Amino acid sequence: MFGKKIFKFIFVTFILLTLVFVTYSTAEEKVTMHGTVVTTKYNQLEVDDEDGHVIAVTESKQVHFNKATGEKFPQVSKVILDFNYKTGHGTLKSYAVMTSPSGDKIFTEGKGSPVEKGHWKGTYVYTKGTGKYEGIKGKGTWETQSLAPQISYMESEGVMELPSR
């Protein structure tokens, strides 16, 4: 009798611990997106230390499409540029808020540099999320190609981890 009670106790404890572990584990997902970027604000100052060196702050509005699900994610990005348009060298730092179709938000930080005129590459990390994306972690790479003044095409690929609920 005593052995059956201990067995039941151990079995129930094991099941409960398994459920707790599964609840707090993460689900990793590969995310590949593409979309359009339109720069809506651009403020630039010349640095005057060398010909063509500028610093700028921009705002852009984007629409990303998840290649796997087809979902549309509008995004607003704020970018700080330190760039020399004569030499093509420079860096950028970005902060973005992406909104899911359900209204949940994903926040990212990115950095990048030019590859050639009108072509930039960089990396991003997820910094936080709301709703379904609360507790988000992950990172990835991005690439943009200028299509026309203030309009670019963007592709990104990365890994997103969400806590299981």
Image: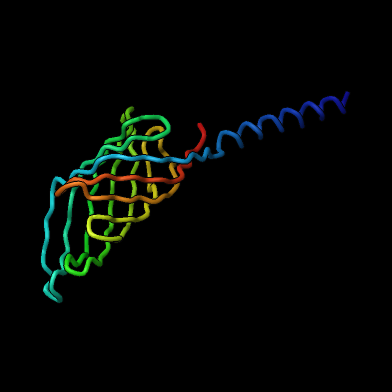
Is residue 6 left or right of 59 when viewed as pictured? right
How many badges with numbers are in the image?
0
Q: Nearer the viewer, residue 31 or 144?
A: 144
Residue 105 found in image quarter: top left
Q: Residue furthest top?
A: 1
Residue 57 found in image quarter: bottom left
Question: Which residue is rendered at x = 38% and y = 48% of the image?
Answer: 127
In the image, residue 64 sits, relative to residue 118, either above or below, namely above
Question: Which residue is rendered at x = 14% and y = 76% of the image?
Answer: 49
Q: Nearer the viewer, residue 79 or 83?
A: 83
Q: Nearer the viewer, residue 21 or 8?
A: 21
By what rule are the colours in the image chosen? rainbow
Q: Quadrant of the N terminus?
A: top right
Measured as percent of width and height from the top left, residue 71 is found at 35, 30
In the image, residue 17 sits, relative to residue 143, either above or below, namely above
Is residue 16 left or right of 143 when viewed as pictured? right
Q: Nearer the viewer, residue 132 or 149?
A: 149
Question: Which residue is rendered at x = 17% and y = 52% of the image?
Answer: 58
Measured as percent of width and height from the top left, residue 136 is found at 43, 42
Is residue 26 left or right of 158 when viewed as pictured? right
Residue 68 found in image quarter: top left
In the image, residue 164 sits, relative to residue 41, either above or below, namely above
Question: Which residue is rendered at x = 87% and y = 28% of the image?
Answer: 3
Q: Residue furthest bottom?
A: 49
Measured as percent of width and height from the top left, residue 21 is found at 61, 37
